[in-house]
Amino acid sequence: MRTFKSKLLYRKKHNKSIILELIKKILLKYDDVNLIIHPRYNSFESVEQFDKNRVKVIENEAVDSTSIAAFSDLFIGGGGTINIEAAYYGTPVISLKPVITLYEDYMLKNELTHRPKDLNNIEEILSIVEKNLNNRYDKKNISKLWIETKKDAINSFYEKMRLIID
């Protein structure tokens, strides 16, 4: 689980306690799930309330987060490159980023990431977790999709940029 950039302006409307509530509910619902939390900033508040055998918070240390995402059964991220990397390695991705970027739009259209309609609706997020936990993407099909649609994604990006510039 990669936390989101809580210090950004667009993040102010998002419920900050959603991650803590989501962690609690996932741990209650799934006895066999362990969580790795990689906060963007130096501290992750209220972590002491979780069982240290099931929740590992990576703070103040360098870590190969791409490998962690690649070998995870599910990746919940705040958006960004790590979401793309997780999907590339076949890990199901749930994005909780409040704005949809060009790359996330592409990933949603190609079913490489999932996102709730309401980012503050825990039950909706848990439903997406349920559908995607331990349901890895076929890596062969993922690689083929990336290669086949790379030109489409680049062309789409350039078209959207031209609209902005013109």
Image (spheres, rainbow, N blue to C red):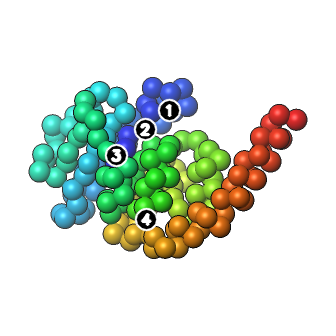
Disc with the residue nearer the chain's start (1 vs 4): 1
State yes or no: discs 2 and 4 in contact (Cβ < 8 Å). Answer: no
Residue 83 visible at all? yes
| Nearest the eye: 39 or 71 | 71
Q: Is residue 161 left or right of residue 74?
A: right
State yes or no: discs 1 and 3 in contact (Cβ < 8 Å). Answer: no
Q: Residues within 10 Å of mark 3 (few under 14, many from 20)?
A: some
Which one is closest to the eye, mark 1 or mark 4? 4
Residue 120 visible at all? no
Disc with the residue nearer the chain's start (2 vs 3): 2
Q: Which residue is mark 2?
A: 4
Q: Is residue 103 left or right of residue 63?
A: right
* Residue 65: numbered disc: 3
Instruction: Check disc 4 and report its element: helix, strand or loop.
Output: loop
* Residue 90: numbered disc: 4
State yes or no: discs 1 and 2 in contact (Cβ < 8 Å). Answer: yes
Residue at position x 25%, y 30% in the image? 60
Three-letter amino acid code at disc 3? Answer: Ser
What is the CA distance from the residue labelled 2 to the residue labelled 4? 21 Å
What is the CA distance from the residue labelled 1 to the residue labelled 2? 8 Å
Which one is closest to the eye, mark 1 or mark 2? 2
Three-letter amino acid code at disc 2? Answer: Phe
What is the CA distance from the residue labelled 2 to the residue labelled 3? 14 Å
Q: Which residue is mark 1?
A: 11
